[in-house]
Image: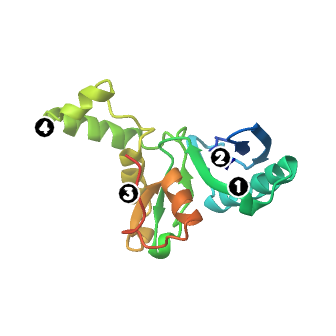
Amino acid sequence: MAIVAGVDFGTQSTRVSLFDSVRGRLGSAVAEYPVKRRREDPNFATQSHSDHMRALAEATRAALKAAGVAGDQVASIALDTTGSTVIPLGAGLQPLDDYYLWCDHRASKEAGEITAQARETGLEALNWCGGVYSSEWGFSKLLHWLRTNPDKRGSMVTAMEHCDLVAAALCGISDPTAAPRSI
């Protein structure tokens, strides 16, 4: 018998389910967090890392209670996050800003530039994604952040996808060279 916590970070909530290898699902819980939007900019959509971690703790505690299990009985955690949720980080993997969500489209100009450069250089990878680099994807968002935050650029050590930062935080990793990255 092994208990696994399945964690799913969605656009507006974190869901945690506990599963036993023999008995199946034991319990689950949900904790919400806000999407930060701006009326004057419909392309803006961010979230706070601290809100995500608070929701993870809250949903985990509630799932453990619903399942009637102690935290030390959980053998492993499986994480799932919405892709292309990028965050710039400073020393110690501390967030310099909020996550750019998948639905944040402020980087459309940058995506167009990446697409044009990829076409000009014949980058084969462009063919793998339908011929157009999206403003929903990480590099366009990161380029947008760098351009619109010149005061914070000097503090940036790296940028990570949401899933990679959550895994690093849960493992106590604060060195960017030691943090595993998703492909």
Give the mark nearest the N terminus, 4 or 2.
2
Distance between the Cα atoms at labels 4 and 2? 40 Å
Placement of 127 over or under 161, stated as above or below: above
Placement of 168 over or under 90, stated as above or below: above
Report x, y in % for residue 12.
70, 42
Give the mark nearest the N terminus, 3 or 1.
1
Q: Secondary structure at mark 1?
A: helix
Report x, y in % for residue 29.
80, 45
User: Residue 147, which numbered label?
Assistant: 3
Q: Residue at x 43, y 70 (%)?
A: 151
Give the mark nearest the N terminus, 2 or 3.
2
Q: Nearer the viewer, mark 2 or mark 3?
A: 2
User: Residue 98, which numbered label?
Assistant: none
Q: Amino acid at mark 2?
A: Val
How many C-alpha atoms fall within 10 Å of the one at disc 4: few (<14), some, or many (≥20)? few
Q: Nearer the viewer, mark 3 or mark 4?
A: 4
How many C-alpha atoms fall within 10 Å of the one at disc 3: few (<14), some, or many (≥20)? few
Report x, y in % for residue 95.
53, 66
**Pointer 4: what residue?**
121
Give the mark nearest the N terminus, 2 or 1.
2
| Left or right of 14, for residue 67 | right
**Pointer 2: what residue?**
7
* Label pair 2/3, CB-CB below 8 angstroms: no
- Determine the image quadrant of residue 51: bottom right
User: Residue 56, which numbered label?
Assistant: 1
Depth check, front residue: 132 or 56: 56
Q: Secondary structure at mark 4?
A: helix
* Label pair 2/1, CB-CB below 8 angstroms: yes
Distance between the Cα atoms at labels 2 and 3? 33 Å
Q: Nearer the viewer, mark 2 or mark 1?
A: 2
